[in-house]
Image (cartoon, rainbow, N blue to C red):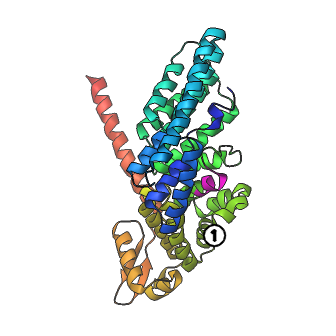
Amino acid sequence: MSDNAVFAKKPELALAQHRFAALNGTPEQRAEAVERLAAGVRQDSMVAFYDRLVAEGVLQGDAGTRQELEAASAARLAELDKAVEDAKEEEGDLEQNEASIHRAVFLAQIGEEERAHAAYEEVLQRPSTTLNQKLDIVFGKLRLGLFYYSPRVIQKEIGRAHELVNKGGDWDRRNRLKAIECIWHCSQRQFKEASTLFIECLSTYSSPELMPMSEFVCHGALACAVVLGRADLKKKVLDAPEVVEVVGAIPNVDRMLRSLYDCKYADFFVALAAVDTDHLRVSRYLSAHRLYHAREMRIRGYAQLLESYLSLTIKSMADAFGVTQEFIDQELSRFAAAGRLHCVIDKVGGIVVTNRPDTKNAQYQNTIKQGDLLLNRIQKLSGIISM
């Protein structure tokens, strides 16, 4: 498969991200996103996507612009249709398949979602389609699913990709699939799975068509922040050469993680708010989970501080995080009542007393419970044997 087809990576996923930022970002982020969208739409003759953006109010409709886009896309599509016909008459099955995939890629490029899926699927079902061509088609359909964020399509094509990769996919395609799955798990709030895949493919990331390295590190690091222990977070994320290389592009993510590790909680809270504005709010994969992520990170900060003391005053804790005593009181009360923090608040004395769970006693009680269940099953089994 030539680079002009599948490896052109159309439609550009960056445009889907710009669309999301244009709808959800700050005024500055929206202005920049609209500018990039307009340039991208014109560059790729995305007439169908242009119509969608105009309908959503992201771009201002212009008859001249639309006519220009339609003419350019129609001319190119006519060329591709002719190439498909010529391949059928003059060349072999592989060349016919490649010409058809070129056409499907262009349909995806201009925003014809349903027609592109149908075109991809038609080639995929041909007996003459090779394994590599099938993989590239599935990746093309996956890209469409990600562009329009269609969970059903994404889940289906990830399953197909795994089946094909297991039949003989090369290293590059396996690595690309891991990167896609990492981002997919992020979007589904499956941060444990996402963090595992992120660490596995961080050193070999080669999917700039999915997102730039800095954005991939940002998403992976934010997933790891929720699930990794303090030592692993430092070793596998903060100190990873690939992360260090791009921290300049995501300074607030780096500041949030390092201040948490260094127990600089006031800096941690400031960076946490900046991460929400700069990244979580405008990420189409993480935006739906921004409140959850912020809550989990606050809990991590509180728990880390409480682990160092048997008790401390509410005032000292509020000072450490750079917030008011009322805020800390409300937060700790809520999280302690939900069982997320192991502490008791003495409002009269103005102190917080930690009550770390007795893990040995819990293990002992669990062993007794499991033993009782086993004995009951043995008794039932002996009764059946006796009969």
Query: If the image is split into quadrants, where does the C terminus sit?
Result: top left
Observer-nearest residue: 276 or 313?
276
Q: Residue at x 41, y 74 (%)?
A: 343
Q: Residue at x 43, y 40 (%)?
A: 150
Q: Secondary structure at mark 1?
A: helix
Observer-nearest residue: 225 or 341?
225
The residue carrying pointer 1 sits among few (fewer than 14), some (14 to 19) or many (20 or more) residues within 10 Å by Cα, namely some
Q: Which residue is mark 1?
A: 258
- Amino acid type of disc 1? Arg
Q: Is residue 138 visible?
A: no
Q: Position of residue 81 (x, y in %)?
A: 56, 22
Observer-nearest residue: 354 or 223?
223
Q: Is residue 310 above or below residue 227?
A: below
Q: Is residue 336 above or below residue 381?
A: below
Q: Position of residue 369 (x, y in %)?
A: 36, 49
Residue 217 is a magenta residue: yes
Q: Is residue 249 left or right of residue 367?
A: right
Question: As drawn, which residue projects farthest toward the left?
Answer: 387
Q: Identify the image quadrant of residue 364.
A: bottom left
Q: Residue at x 55, y 25 (%)?
A: 78
Q: Residue at x 50, y 86 (%)?
A: 319
Question: As drawn, which residue projects farthest toward the top?
Answer: 89
Magenta residue span: 211-218
What is the chief secondary structure element of the magenta stretch? helix
Query: If the image is split into quadrants, where does the N terminus sit?
Result: top right
Q: Position of residue 238 (x, y in %)?
A: 67, 62
Q: Is residue 319 above or below residue 38?
A: below
Q: Is residue 35 above or below residue 150?
A: below
Residue 274 is a magenta residue: no
Q: Is residue 269 visible?
A: yes
Q: Identify the image quadrant of residue 374.
A: top left
Q: Position of residue 167 (x, y in %)?
A: 61, 22
